[in-house]
Amino acid sequence: MPSRPDHGESVSRLSVKTMADALLSNDLLEALPDAIVAVDSDGTIVQVNSQAQELFGYAREELVGQKVEMLVPNSYRAQHRHHRQTFAEAPKMRQMGADLDLYGRRRNGSEFPVEIALSPISTEKGSFVLSAIRDISDRKRIAEELRRVNEELYRRTTEQLGEYRSRLASIIDSSEDAILSKNLDGTITSWNRGAERMYGYMAEQVIGRHISLLAPPDRADEISNILQKIVAGESVDHFESVRLTKEGLHLDVSISVSPLRNAIGEVVGASVIARDITAQKRSEAQLRQSQKMEAIGRLAGGVAHDFNNILGIVNACTEFLRDRLDPATEPSVYVENIRKAIDRGKALTRQLLTFSRTSAIQPQLLDMNDRLKDIGKLLRPLLGDDIEVVIVSKSPSAVIEADPGQLDQIVVNLAVNARDAMPRGGKLILEAGPVTIDEAYADQRQAFTAGKYIQLAVSDTGFGMNEATVSRIFEPFFTTKEIGKGTGLGLATVYGIVKQSGGHILVYSEPGQGTTFKIYFPSADHKIGLASKTDAETVGPKRHGNTILLVEDDEIMRGLTRQLLQEHGYSVVEADDGKSALECVQSHQGQIDLLLTDVVMRRMSGPELAERLSVSHPTLKVVYMSGYTGELMTNREVLKPGVTLLEKPFTRKSLLNTIHTTLG
């Protein structure tokens, strides 16, 4: 029996990578109006929302960890287990119709009829079943009352018919569902208030007209097919289709049609009960989209990891070649071209990791003027030749402290939205410059604090938005795009990144006048000169006497990294995985000063190896190297305190300076 929430699209913001896990964390569950119970494959309750607590009378802590059968009356538990086993054999989104008698049991022992919609969910923690539960006591009561009243109508005298018809009309009008009747030729004969609310027509506007006025042109055949079944005395239960409102809007509906009979049992018409399930369909589509995006994100992260390993090998080889070539010779030019290609490959993998949200957040000092110039090179082929990209620098310096990948993601997301708003071409303007927010302006904008900011303005000459759209623009899953052309997460992600960076974002837009996003990042001009000098073009002097344990499962990469370290004076003990590294440490006679390990390896990960070695070598320094940093991040996707990460592909400069800094 399907759950049919009628709420809007607004749910809590979710990251693309962990949408399904966020669902089980109760964020999205609280936005749904029905009681939601998440159950694992053993039938154990793992999560409920507040509506479930209210419906069954239990607190969340009394339910989580218990078998779901505690919510089922004793007489129905065998039937419930059968349904659960059947679903486990073929898990898919499933609705349990009204032909099944399903009951729930409250804490006080009272039993009540329910309808349930089941949805399988796969997360990083395993497979779960999401049950949307609705108390249908009122519906059962109304159905029983309808049946009883109909019997009374046939049994009573003509004088009494008026009274019971009035009573029946009152019951029908009290329903939130659209309830109507029609003749066998499809002419509408009755129309309740629920139908008025759903379709927008008053009763006098539709009674006497053909039922086909509610069907889109591509659904016209459905009307005749349903009428044929009614004439044959058949019913149509929970048939899902699309219907039109008076304003021309499309509604997803669940329709049940039953024959109407006269006193001698002849079919003379049909009764129709329709429920608006548009919100439910939208929620289901969003859930499927979030699962798809999570899978795509995992794929992107895996591809980036492997590609970064390959780039690391190529980069190391070019380092050695460059040292052995005269810079004035032609081969040296080719080597430099390879290095430039590596940089482009690094930018591509960075974009992949940013999209998959497995790129660690590493704030650094950035001049937004320089960053916008680099981003502009990526935007021009992305937006197409019919959109002009203009970059305006309002000052020589516009320094902020932010993660460069996240700044790229903000601009790219806004640029893609601008492109969709300019289907016939237009202009995208990126402006950066310092602004000062005084106390008076900060008082008008409660979220602001007075101070110096760097303003990034992204403007387009597109369609623009009305006030209602602007008011919801940052809501997760809110989108004005067609189904399949937008997740509704782009601007929600932008908002989250800006807030995480300590900034603010404002939107200015009018229909036909384009849109401007103004983003304010705290100025970091005062930090210039305090930045680390480890990124200098030169590296420190050669060091002798330090021993490094190098753990890398790629043989070529391990050999090249060993050579880079040895040429700089380090002694190297190498291993191809965590198990071998532990054996090397046991057999090594001297001191090991630093562990340089890959993150993702077979048999034992880098973090696990570091933890094992910390017991016997508490002063051991650790540097991780990886092209896929997800394993080193907390749930907030920020590097854990004290973790030193060397992202692949790395240069000799970054490798040696990182180790030099870590060793002190």
Image (tube, rainbow, N blue to C red):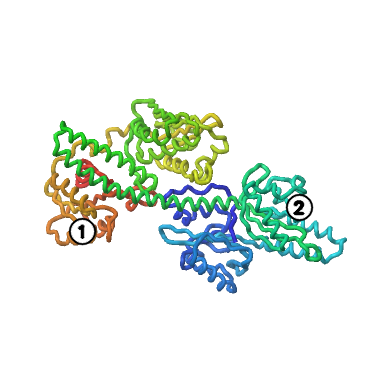
Between 617 and 190, the one lying in front of the other is 190
- Find disc 2 in the rendering and name its residue: 190
Q: Is 151 left, or right, of 239 in this rendering? A: right
Residue 354, position in %: x, y? 37, 44
Q: Which label belongs to residue 126?
A: none
Q: Secondary structure at mark 2?
A: strand
The location of residue 71, given as percent across then percent down, is: 56, 67
Q: Which residue is mark 1?
A: 581
Q: Earlier in the sequence, mark 1 or mark 2?
A: 2
Question: How far is disc 1 from disc 2 in space, using C-alphas?
Answer: 80 Å
Mark 2 crowd level (few <14, some 14–19, many ≥20, 10 Å Cα): some
On screen, residue 227 above or below 264: above
Residue 37 x %, y %: 52, 61
Residue 638 is left or right of residue 193, and the answer is left
Asked if residue 355 is positioned above or below residue 103 in the image, the reply reads above
Do callouts 1 and 2 mark residues in contact (Cβ within 8 Å)?
no
Q: Quadrant of the C terminus?
A: top left
Q: Quadrant of the N terminus?
A: bottom right
- Residue 523 occupies which quadrant of the picture? top left
Q: Residue at x 20, y 34 (%)?
A: 333
Which of labels 1 and 2 is toward the front?
2
What secondary structure is found at the residue carrying circle 1?
A: helix
The foreground one among 644 and 148 is 148
**Residue plotted at (70% across, 51% down):** 194
For badge 2, the amino acid type reads Ser
In the current view of this chain or complex, which residue is farthest to the right?
159
Q: Is residue 266 left or right of residue 93?
A: right
Q: In the rendered image, is residue 446 in sight?
A: yes
Q: Nearer the viewer, residue 343 or 184?
A: 184
